[in-house]
Image (cartoon, helix red, strand yellow):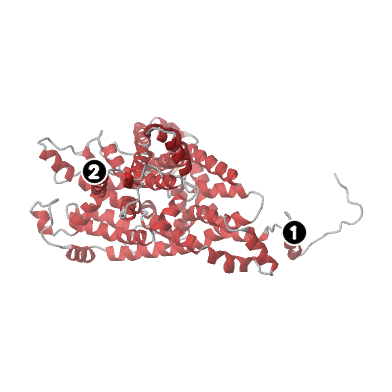
Amino acid sequence: MILSSGPARTVTPSWRTVLARLRVRAGGGDLVTPALLLLPPLSLFVLMIVSPILQSIWISLYEWDGTGPATWVGLANYRELFADAQFYVSLKNNALWLVFFLLAPVIGLALALFLNQKLLEMRLVKSLFFMPLVLAPVIVGVVFTWFYDPTFGIIAILFRAIGSTPPAILSNETLVTFGIIVAALWAQVAFCLVLFLAGLSQLDSEMIAAARLDGAERWSLFRYIVLPQLRPVAFTASILTVIMSLRNFDMIAVMTQGGPYGSSTVLAYQMFDATIFSFRAGYGAAIATVLFAIMSIYIAVFLWHSLRQEARER
Amino acid sequence: MYPIPIQSASAPARIAYRLALYVALVVWMAPLFAILMTAVRSQGDLLAGNYWGLPSAFALGANLREVFASSPMGLFFINSLVVTCCTVAAVLVLSTMAAVALAKYRFPGRTILFAMFIAGNFVPYQILMIPVRDLVLRIGAYDTVWALILFHTAFQTGFATLFMRNFIVALPDELFEAARLEGASEFQILTKIIVPLLRPALAGLSVLLFTFVWNDYFWALVLVQSDAAKPLTLGLAGLKGEWLTAWNLISAGAVLAALPPVTLFFLMQKHFVAGLTVGAVKA
């Protein structure tokens, strides 16, 4: 403890001197400029992204209709959720989405190997393959709804052509989720294709040429020379695909609204439904919190991977 | 190069490859052909049960006129344009500021901030939904295009900062030191030196942001209600519910909604692809 002897000398440096001192810190690195530059984007980000996350977790501890007064209920929303049959339907569908979405990196890689050729028209062909990426999920949802229509959809017509009864994909409780996943996979494969084509363009060609000279067989060349070099891309494609699979909302909302009888809901949709249609914001927030907790695992893996790669490059 | 260039294969193999390529392309594009074919189909064709055959007449103009006359899709188009353009402009400014700070200045907490901007990209919208809706209601922006602009700007700033930072890190430090020695202020360095060098990156980022914001459906559903503020995606989903079997009109609406991002994509394909692979693949 420091006891001041004599009258305390108050030093009130003008803000200019403080600024100047800050500028001198960190070996000429100045702190004011980055602070000023970060202030507007960061405050907006904290206001609209960071603080809502914390607020949602907080709201999940209340019974609230979204407008009126809220009552503290502790973990009651979670207890109710874990006893809710609909929650397990959503969870099961989320798992289906996740597993079947992982076909996207596999198909994307196969397609990338198929398209990685230099032909005159290849540039145009590739951009046509990329196109689903720029289409709104709503549009894709609308088109596939029509494909699946049991009376005049193309699937129904094909089924009738071979003389069998067409399935009503979107009103069949077991088929419906697969129907939506197939529609969503279209754009996800395109995304993985973009990543793998970029990865293929950066392969070490000398290494491949050397392996070919050494007489590496097709499969072993792919397995031991090409695939290891594609590993970082494959990792990124897979983890991003998992994250996207858990975020999907638009297609379900447009194609089935979670139906028939809630059989195609996922956590993202169930949350929206509970909050907007059943006016149960607290319960909805609890669903959102569970979804967020699940996704945090994958986000953390991705973050860890990118920061490590970042550190390696420096 | 991997796989082996097809040029070095035998003639039959080359022909087989081309054939397979076009078949794959047609299958891949089937949903798009379906929208286009249906958008040009007349009501008569649909009534006659001609859903998938060749259209008997080219009725795209008539269908679009009908869409504009009997629904507010024209207004929705303008709303989408306003929301998207305002958001893109605001995000370009904010993310360049944040990215310069994160890339070229050393300060405590830099990595954590950077991590936060990356992670913010991937959080599920639902964890933000209730508080964001509440906030927008409280500031009186609910059911206006401003609600959408505000949220999209905040959300996209995360991705855009990550994107811009990767470009700015690559700029040589000597550039900054030389400018400082010449007596340029930090602000001048930013506007006179950095921004002009970033033009290609900003172009690529704009295309990506345009697509992301234009295609949004969830936030439109949560933050707006009336026709005066609805974007096209919401309008299109509404048409689907309202017109049920007028598939030619719904498809014409879908074409309308797809046109701006698709056009932009073809004009700036290289930037778009480069943008998507930033962070995912080493350049």
- Residue at the farthest front position: A213
- Residue A2 image position (x, y, % from top left): 86, 47
The chain holding disc 2 is B
Which image quadrant for residue A226? top left
Q: Give percent across and percent down for residue B66.
A: 19, 64
How crowded pointer 1 is (Cα within 10 Å; few <14, some 14-19, many 20+) is rated as: few
Quick check: can you spot residue A80? no
Q: Judge from the rendering whether residue A146 lies leftward or rightward of residue A13; answer left or right.
A: left
* Amino acid type for the residue under numbered disc 2: Pro
Disc 2 from disc 1: Cα separation: 71 Å
Asked whether residue A118 appears in the rendered view, the answer is yes
* Chain name for mark 1: A
Q: Which residue is mark 1?
A: A24
Location of the N terminus of chain A by quadrant is top right
Front residue of B144 and A209: A209
Task: Note whether A233 is above or below A132 in the view shown.
Answer: above
* A298 relative to B258, above or below: above
Tag nearer the camera, 2 or 1: 2
In screen coordinates, is B253 left or right of A161?
Answer: right
Q: Nearer the viewer, residue B30 or B24?
A: B24
The circle drawn on residue B12 is 2
Amino acid at dot 1? Val
Locate residue A277 relative to residue B22 in the image: left or right.
Answer: right
Could you tell me which secondary element the residue under label 1 belongs to? helix
Residue at screen point 64% across, 48% down:
B109
Residue in the image at 17% along x and 55% along y: B246
* Residue at 70% in and 57% down: A29
Circle 2 packing at 10 Å, graded few (<14), some (14-19), many (20+), is few
The location of residue B241, given as percent across then percent down, is 23, 52
Numbered marks: total? 2
